[in-house]
Image: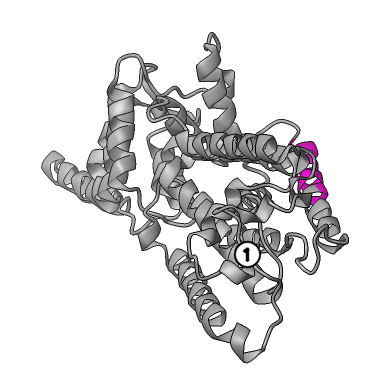
């Protein structure tokens, strides 16, 4: 038997270590491979590793990550006050189910939020935070209402500052109330303003005889048939629209809302060609249906309390409002031959919410322009808008539709 010299043994041991280290290199790693790598730095299987080991892990394998994700992870290590990193936060950031890249906006703002001394990302669940003021509890509540992943909820909680506030939904709601009160005093009617002969004479509601006035395809949202119509739309707009705007921003929520509004009026002009349109139901139903679909698709991740009961209540509110609109449409009109306002705008809003809206809400702080599904739905929506425009230009005369007289 030949004994190896210490130098030979050390060389062999070094080669063995080099081989072992080379096996740690992972390609675009799925979650189980990242778990295996994390476990090598967590021999006690505690679910945590020290920040020093965490930095070693990033130094050895950071090149395999998207640069934005790497920046967030480094910020997580630099700003952690407990001296240890939770596996769940780590794997959620490096290996999401959809393999979506972080935007520059998210990585930079997340890094700044973590590095602020008063805001350090904690390893405990966000729900376990104590001693929060009313405004911070509201932010936490909104996070659990709208976001399915804990790492997203923590990032949102640590970065949201109420600046800017959710101004879009509030401004639209205030404008609707002001317009309703103005017409209430002008017409001396509050319950069913639509029964007044002057209700459709203003510059806001959509009327088939005035469809060449393009702004009416959007401005009709500020007119409502009565106080019950306004009340139901306001409730859903504030209870769902404001939290969604707090999380996703005015631009994204405004996109879904306006697309729902425009789809609603065009759907009426195509399928219910003689009817006028009033109310913000197209935009409201786009937001609510998108939110409900997002909750169902991420049911296990959504941690909001009483979510089944609250979903049922939302569906009841939508059904009541839709039933009211259907009843009103077929109720004998106060001033024939002009029919009462159409209910089809609700369906146009739902169609937008279940397609374009779901994509927007699912891709929280991700680049929408990089999501193929977003462009597919947006292209279909654009095609629908173009077909609706051509329909309004040519179909009424070709089909010889008998329209009610102008208001």
- State the residue in front, 125 or 102: 102
Element type at mark 1: loop
Q: Is residue 72 left or right of residue 389?
A: left
**Count of numbered marks:** 1
Across and down, in percent, residue 186 comes to: 66, 38
- State the residue in front, 320 or 331: 331
Q: Residue at x 52, y 50 (%)?
A: 361
| Residue placed under numbered mark 1 in the picture | 207
Q: Residue at x 67, y 44 (%)?
A: 300
Label 1: few (<14), some (14–19) or many (≥20) C-alpha neighbours in 10 Å: many
Q: Quadrant of the C terminus?
A: bottom right
Across and down, in percent, residue 200 comes to: 66, 55
- State the residue in front, 299 or 188: 188
- State the residue in front, 287 or 401: 401
- The colour scheme used to paint the residues is one colour
- In the rendered structure, does residue 308 fall within the stretch colored magenta? yes
Q: Residue furthest top?
A: 131
Magenta residues span 307-320
Across and down, in percent, residue 311 comes to: 75, 43
């Amino acid at each position: 038997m030949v004994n190896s010299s210490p130098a030979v043994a050390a060389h062999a041991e070094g080669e063995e270590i080099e081989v072992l280290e080379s096996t740690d290199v992972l390609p675009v790693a799925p979650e189980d491979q990242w778990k295996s790598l994390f476990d090598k730095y967590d021999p006690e299987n505690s679910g945590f590793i020290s920040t020093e080991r965490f930095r070693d892990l990033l130094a050895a394998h950071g090149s395999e990550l998207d640069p934005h994700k790497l920046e967030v992870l480094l910020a997580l290590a630099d700003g952690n006050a407990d001296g240890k990193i939770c596996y769940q936060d780590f794997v959620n950031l490096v290996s999401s189910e959809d393999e979506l890249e972080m935007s520059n906006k998210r990585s930079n703002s997340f890094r700044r939020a973590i590095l602020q001394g008063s805001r350090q990302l904690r390893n405990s669940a966000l729900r376990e935070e104590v001693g929060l003021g009313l405004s911070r509890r509201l932010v936490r509540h909104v996070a659990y209402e709208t976001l399915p992943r804990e790492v997203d909820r923590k990032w949102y909680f640590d970065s949201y500052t109420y600046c800017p506030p959710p101004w879009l939904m509030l401004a639209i709601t205030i404008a609707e109330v002001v317009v309703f009160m103005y017409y209430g005093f002008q017409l001396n009617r509050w319950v069913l303003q639509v029964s007044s002969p002057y209700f459709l004479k203003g510059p806001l509601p959509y009327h088939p005889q005035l469809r060449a006035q393009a702004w009416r395809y959007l401005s009709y949202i500020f007119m409502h048939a009565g106080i019950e119509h306004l009340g139901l739309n306001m409730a859903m707009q504030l209870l769902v629209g404001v939290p969604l705007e707090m999380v996703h921003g005015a631009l994204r929520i405004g996109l879904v809302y306006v697309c729902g509004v425009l789809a609603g009026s065009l759907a009426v002009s195509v399928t219910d060609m003689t009817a006028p349109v009033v109310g913000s139901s197209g935009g409201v139903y786009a937001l609510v249906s998108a939110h409900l679909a997002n909750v169902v698709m991420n049911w296990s991740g959504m941690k909001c309390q009483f979510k089944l009961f609250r979903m049922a209540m939302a569906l009841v509110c939508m059904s009541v409002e839709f039933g009211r609109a259907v009843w009103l449409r077929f109720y004998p009109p106060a001033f024939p031959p002009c029919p009462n306002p159409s209910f089809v705008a609700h369906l146009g809003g739902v169609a937008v919410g279940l397609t374009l809206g779901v994509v927007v809400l699912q891709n929280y702080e991700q680049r929408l322009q990089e999501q193929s599904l977003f462009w597919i739905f947006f292209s279909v929506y654009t095609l629908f808008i173009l077909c609706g425009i051509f329909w309004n230009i040519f179909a009424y005369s070709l089909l010889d539709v008998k329209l009610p007289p102008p208001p």
